[in-house]
Amino acid sequence: WETLCRLRKENPGKICPRPAAIEAKTLSGLTVAAAGDVIYKNDITSGFICRNKDQINNKKCNDYRVRFSCYPPFCERGVCWTSWFNRDDPGTTGDWEVLSELKKQKKICDNPLYVDAVTTDTMTPAIYTGETFYMYNPTDGFVCRNKDQTTGKCSDYKVRFGCPCNN
């Protein structure tokens, strides 16, 4: 049972919010097909589950390990991510996580390469919320304006910046 939920708890911050793919292999390196087990779940939402009760002739499942592929820039080499910042709550005009304001309070590199925004409650990437953004770039930061939303209100977002790593 290599469920995504449990793996995230055991490896905080090491699995991207929305994996693109999952790969499972036995500890000895066999693919699922080569191992011959009947697999119950093998997807980016649930993770990987091999149940002994599904196997033929009372065989037990092999021991598996999994890895997830993520969309850039989560796993970009040479990029160091800041902590998450939540400077503003969505008030009367929206949620304003502006880089110039964040730099006054937080240590952020001079020229970030990336900006990443997620909701504060569920860590849903901003691009999957269906909301429209006024600003979303590493030079200026992130702004969600209430007036641009069909619901009239933005979610509460937090942001982080990807900076060049100092080696």
Image (spheres, grey):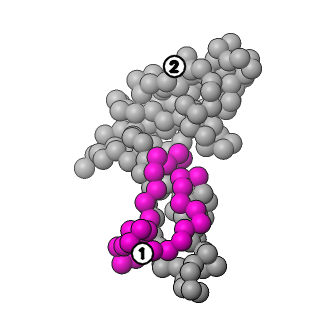
In this view, the residue farthest toward the left is: 167
- Horizontal arrangement in the rendering, residue 54 relative to residue 104 (left or right): right
User: Picture quarter containing residue 82?
Assistant: top left
| Residue nearest the viewer, comparing 42 with 102 | 42
For the point 63% across and 24% down, the residue is 131
Place of residue 51 in the rendered image (x, y in percent of width and height, measured from the top left): 60, 74
Residue 108 visible: no
| Residue stretch in magenta | 16-45
- Horizontal arrangement in the rendering, residue 18 relative to residue 114 (left or right): right
Check disc 2 and report the residue beneath it.
135
Please state which amino acid type lies under the numbered disc 2: Met
Secondary structure under tag 1 reads: helix
Place of residue 84 in the rendered image (x, y in percent of width and height, measured from the top left): 54, 42
| Quarter of the N terminus within the rendering | bottom right
Check disc 1 and report the residue beneath it.
35
For the point 55% across and 31% down, the residue is 127
Disc 1: CA contacts within 10 A as few (<14), some (14-19) or many (>=20):
some
Place of residue 99 in the rendered image (x, y in percent of width and height, measured from the top left): 48, 26
In this view, 8 is above or below 146: below
- Horizontal arrangement in the rendering, residue 94 relative to residue 135 (left or right): right
For the point 36% across and 78% down, the residue is 28
Q: Is residue 131 magenta?
A: no
